[in-house]
Image (cartoon, helix red, strand yellow):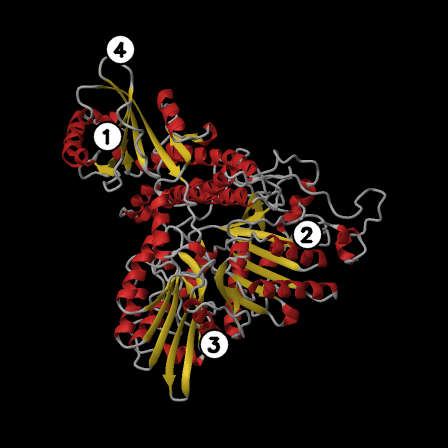
Amino acid sequence: MNERDATADDERGGTTPEEQANDQSTADGSEFAFRSLLDDEGVTASSPAERTDGGAESETTDRAGDQESTADTVIEAESDAGAGAPGSRTDGAAETDDGNAETLPLPEPIGDTSADGDGTDPVEGNDPSSGIADVDLSSPEYYLNRELSELAFQRRVLHEVLDSDNPLLERVKFCSIVTRNLDEFFRKRVGGLKQGIAAGVTEETPDGRTPREQWDAVLEAARPLLERQAECYCEEIRPALADEGIAIVDYDDLSAAERTTLREYFESSVLPTLTPLTFDPAHPFPFISNQSLSLAVLTRERPDAELTFSRVKIPRNQLRFVQLGDDRRYVLLEDVVRANLDLLFPDVEVVDTALFRVTRNAEVRRNEEVAEDLIETIEEVIEERRFAAAVRLEIEPDAPQEVREILTRELELDDREVFELAGPLDYRDFADLTELDRPDLKLPEWSPQPHPRLGRCDDATNVFDAISDRDVLVHHPYHSFEGTVQRFLEAAANDPDVLAIKAAIYRTASDSRVIESLIEAAHNGKQVAVMVELKARFDEENNLEWAKKLEEEGIHVAYGTIGYKTHTKTSLVVREEADGVRLYSHVGTGNYHSETAKSYEDLGLLTADRDIGQDLVRLFNYFTGHSMYRDYRELLIAPGNMRDRFVELIRAEAERARNGEDARIVAKMNRLEDPELVRELYEASMAGVDIDLIVRDICRLRPGLEGISETIDVYSVVGRFLEHSRIFYFRAGGKDRYYIGSADWMTRNLDNRVEAVTPIEDPRLRERLETILETLLEDDRNRWIMRSDGSYDRCRSTDGSSTDVHETFMRSALRPAGRGRIDLGD
């Protein structure tokens, strides 16, 4: 299991943190997904603890100290040049990513490791009287920083841009994703740090940093990441696009005729939309909107006059890529504007210009306890974000010093918050290039498939009969959202036997058929109640519009809950049947969003289990009422019983390990941040529990610490689809307990949000979850392994074979039943 062990000795051999490698990483961001699937060969019905098929276990080394690996997979450290050649490290470290990863000194090993000691492994004996019992697991040295861990994840996302093995337009897509992700990171996380500094907060995080120390470290770590993105675009992606006949042309390289054509286009279509805003004694400094691309323009009326600063916003409602004729040759809109400023500023001299972009804080908060109207409060938050404090300035490297000084002074920015970057500055619109008809430059298209139990939307399968017969596990994007979850709600809206529908909406599409189905249900006389979370960040406006529309249709709408953000992905259908009222439930890991379901990997359970249904009845009563149950029959609900239940499950595995039983935990989530659960995992590892953690994003836990977390491996999977599902497995003495749901192991999820996690009881569905976890642990195309210092190494196959979790499950979904298809729970 422990691929990291093969280099553990090197890690401890005196290598400094500066010499240790950092992932040049890549991964996901706000819009993409991964694929995770397994070929049917070698799939067994054993639990993840029993890897008898030579799969994931063949990639590991013996924990007892045997360094003779049977692995066909190696750990590959990524350099700034992109994907390096596979091979074993002999220097004990991966190549650094310009030194911008969080590589921390390792804590001292627990127990006596001196030459004159007895050599006893302090973990093996589990002796409470040994040094282990005296370890302070709350010590900052055992925790990684949340913000720096997030940036390490963004480096894994960036790796998808740098990786020349990816199709060219896939690299372009990820370039856009990196920008969107980092924009959100600066708005939310860096903005929050600045607020803490301004408020005089000095409280330390679990890793021992104050807001000021985190802010300093984050700016230092983010800079080389942004610089590497710009460098890759200028030196690799743009030339490669040109080689493929997709040229982004400099204005100076245009012919005279082309310039004339563009000048006419500018004058007729662009100029009327521009509004120059001048800063001088008669005009205040102009407001600069968040994330807008702008030109700073210095002009003067005569050669001996002082320079005047003006700001010109590049309009977002115009095409960013201005096409030249019928060819796939484009000029960026900002270059067109810059080249024709004389039409915007007549009778003055345009002395110099600089492209820049400002990012503003999104952490605008309100006290819900004193808010008289939650809708009005959310509307105020949305409005205030427009005017929030600046947290970052991106600007061209050759910008005039006068421009830089004016912007930093008026925006009240520190020099460290200024990022000089070559290239276009804003890559969000580059995702538009992926719409070009160039299949040779993209990954093969993927269309989610019908679920084998439910069939196609237009066939005669009765959804409720299928669910009543046996639970259904849906796996997006391999199973169609429209043909599963959306179909479940549409069927309920039109079924004459359905009495009521209840749903919790966190995020949904702007043209949501899910919402339309709920409205249709109300028109058909059903009782409909919907919990719409107005505090879903950056989706507030969309959710506000849907909430108002639902209310206009006479539907009972709850606008979240005071003090908590509702993050559950749950719905309940109440149906009158021959033997009485039956409850049909959906508990998922992803949003009721038809578009993200095409690129986010998520799971959902459709069940007629009465206990789960009754638990959802209690939960929805809390949404529309005011009192919350703390005890549930089957579901793990936050902030009710979830935290305590997870702690019990982890401790039970630790106790079994102490008693000499096989004990195993496999947990897949987006983020692992909660210090209490990290401590519980450390204690379980010290007891001897075999633990695999598949954490896409933030991870505070440090794996592989001698005497603390030697039996823990942490992996991150980044690829085509965004790994978004949460799966929790506990061996439980051979009972093999599986859970799926909406909650990560973060303090906010366990204590400050309303979350729902459901057990999976059907043996065939458990096998499906086992297959998903095993395939993720066998992936050698998208999987990264975390080192104790917080850096990541990429896993690579050395035997010529390869497992790509997303490709595997796509192939499986396309196969007819009984033709080598992985069990989909059908």
Vertical relation: 285 (above or below) 537:
above
Going from the N terminus, do you reach mark 2 or mark 3 first? 3
Going from the N terminus, do you reach mark 4 or mark 2 first? 4
Residue topped by disc 4: 304
Q: To which quarter of the image does residue 353 belong? A: top left
Local SS, label 2: loop
Asked whether disc 2 touches disc 3, contact meaning CB atoms under 8 Å apart, the reply is no
Residue 376: percent from left, percent from top: 34, 54
Going from the N terminus, do you reach mark 1 or mark 3 first? 1
Going from the N terminus, do you reach mark 4 or mark 1 first? 1
Q: To which quarter of the image does residue 787 belong? A: top right
Residue topped by disc 3: 614
C-alpha gap between disc 1 and disc 3: 61 Å
In the visual, does 31 lie left or right of 351? right
448 and 440: which one is in front? 448
Amino acid at pointer 4: Asp
Amino acid at pointer 3: Gln
Residue 112: percent from left, percent from top: 80, 46
Few, some or many residues within 10 Å of mark 4 (<14, 14–19, 20+): few
Quadrant of image for the C terminus: bottom left
